[in-house]
Amino acid sequence: MNLSGCKRRILLAPLDPVHDVGLKIIRRGLDEAGHDTTLLPPDLAVHEIAERAVREPFDCIMLSRTIGYGAEELLAEFTKMMETAGLKGRVKIAVGGMGIRPELVEGLGFDRGFGPGTTVEEALAFVENRPARTERVRLHKTKPDLTAGYTYRFLNGRIARLLDDIAQDALRWAERRTTAAVERAQIRELAGVGVLTGNLRAEYAALCDPVIRDYYEKAIIPAAVRMVEEDEVAGLRRFCRTADGNAKGISLRHTRSKPAVLIQYGTGSLFLDASHMKVAEAWGADGVIHFDPAWGARTEGLLEGHVNYEGDGTVITAQNLRLLRSFLGEDTLFQVRAHRGLNTPETVVIAGQIGADLTKINIAYGSLGAGTDPERLAVDGIAALKYAAAYGLPYDIVTNEELCGVPAFKAFAGMLIVCRLGLLLGGRPILQPLFCHSPEAMITRKMEDNYIDFNAAKVQALRQIVDAPVWPGAPIGFMTHSEDRVQSAMTTSLHAALGASLEVDAVTIASSDEAYSRGPITAQARVDTLRAVKESFRFLGRGKVEPTAHAIDLAEELTAGIEAVLEQVREAGFVEALYRGMLGSPEDGAYPGRAGKGTVKHYVF
């Protein structure tokens, strides 16, 4: 639409041997606005363009130059000819293109210089003598429900029967047991999201390790922990509001509706975390995942208040999580991990109370790859699954024990047991196969030719077993990243493209310096990876990466291995199977965890 109300004649001419695509795009916009345009072909001499400009009564001349070499001399020659012909001042003259920067044409007599990234609207506004409409419209995104549309129906009857037997037995086993973590979760549920007071505070403190008990009873702050002042929190809120106002919104997926892309954060600092979250949102991330410190997972009890930690991982408190959640847009997913450690059920309660969208629970991985005693985590994990169902929190079941060397079929057997447990308790689990250069595959040479077939086989095998959402992680491309940021961003983007081709529901990506940062991850590294993933989705569109026929053989091999493991687990019982190595043995590289060993309490009926 012509906003000036006046039809203008415009001459467009490339000052290049071949490049005129940009001018053609601008011409289309001018034509659509009702102007009269003439586009000259490439490879004309400057004097030929000038002669055409002199012969006809144009209102505006728009040149383009893609090649930077010699641009200034050519442009100066053209404007000198316009001046000699008496057109300068009577005809508007502009130049743009990849070889042009606005500062280059200053002093050369042009009315306007356009650099790379110029929009049709900017060119149109120049022609129509009006300001360009620069209103930024935030991209409307909808928060995805990763579990929508799935029936959770088991398609492999034999595996379904084995899982039912194992899960029912595990639930009966857990009915007779409790832990300090379960009791703390019950207290936290009674107290709500605020700080603990009165008798509840005293009862809670009695269930904690000394370092946490000292905080509640003596106000002693643990080492490396700093309480954040209220004025600092207020400043952080102002910063995030400003960031929201400047964000224009980016969609990573181009023409696809999935996968959702989530990033991990957990610097220990609320200030850095908030910055990374806003950067990730601004560059198109669909969700963020809260990482907590390893020491927190091995300590009974959680702190309260706004807390910074001088180490890796951000301390889980209701106040920290609620504050960070408040910084996110309504369309951004927020996940709080609870899949390991001695505070699993309480973490899920807090996640539910502060309005998280997702959590993460896996008893097998937490016992074999994250250091918690299997009996303890089985009791805590089953309680956490109940809370997740009660709060309506979907949860992924990560299989990162593969990174210890556990074969995928064993890790998947553990994941499917937790999946079945969750379904029996009313939950909405999400399967999370490790999507990487698998350590198992390195040893067995399953990925010698490519990184596609084994990862594709994992997804195919799971889909042949159960109709459930799949969210590869965590993060994708693990063991393919190096200290080269370009290389790390590229392998992440290739794995994202494979995930999109397999139509998975979400992927977790790392920043490009996660493999070597040895400290806080840089914001630029996050942007690198998000941009690389965006480019891979743009490259792919609705196309796909196809695995070879070998993936079918690998999927069948995985399924057979899962069935064999589940047969063994049914005979031994879930928890005993974890101790005996049926779901990951010392020979594989997995050891039953020791944190919380001997702390399970048995009910006496």
Image (spheres, grey):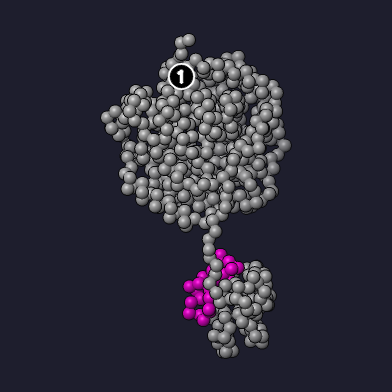
Can you give x and y, in whole percent of width and height, for residue 90 in the image? 57, 86
Residue denoted by label 1: 178
**Residue at 53% from the left image edge and 61% from the top image edge:** 136
**Residue at 54% from the left image edge and 47% from the top image edge:** 331
Who is closer to the viewer here, 191 or 410? 191
**Residue at 58% from the left image edge and 32% from the top image edge:** 429
Q: Is residue 478 visible?
A: no
Q: Is residue 114 magenta?
A: yes
The image quadrant where one finds the N terminus is bottom right
Identify the secondary structure beneath mark 1: strand
User: Which of the 4 image quadrants contains residue 573?
Assistant: top right
User: Which of the 4 image quadrants contains residue 86?
Assistant: bottom right
User: Which region is colored magenta?
Assistant: 96-123
Decide: is 496 above or below 223: below
Can you give x and y, in whole percent of width and height, for residue 30 in the image? 64, 72
Per the picture, the main secondary structure of the magenta-coloured stretch is: loop
Who is closer to the viewer here, 152 or 475? 152
Can you give x and y, in whole percent of width and height, for residue 248 in the image? 52, 56
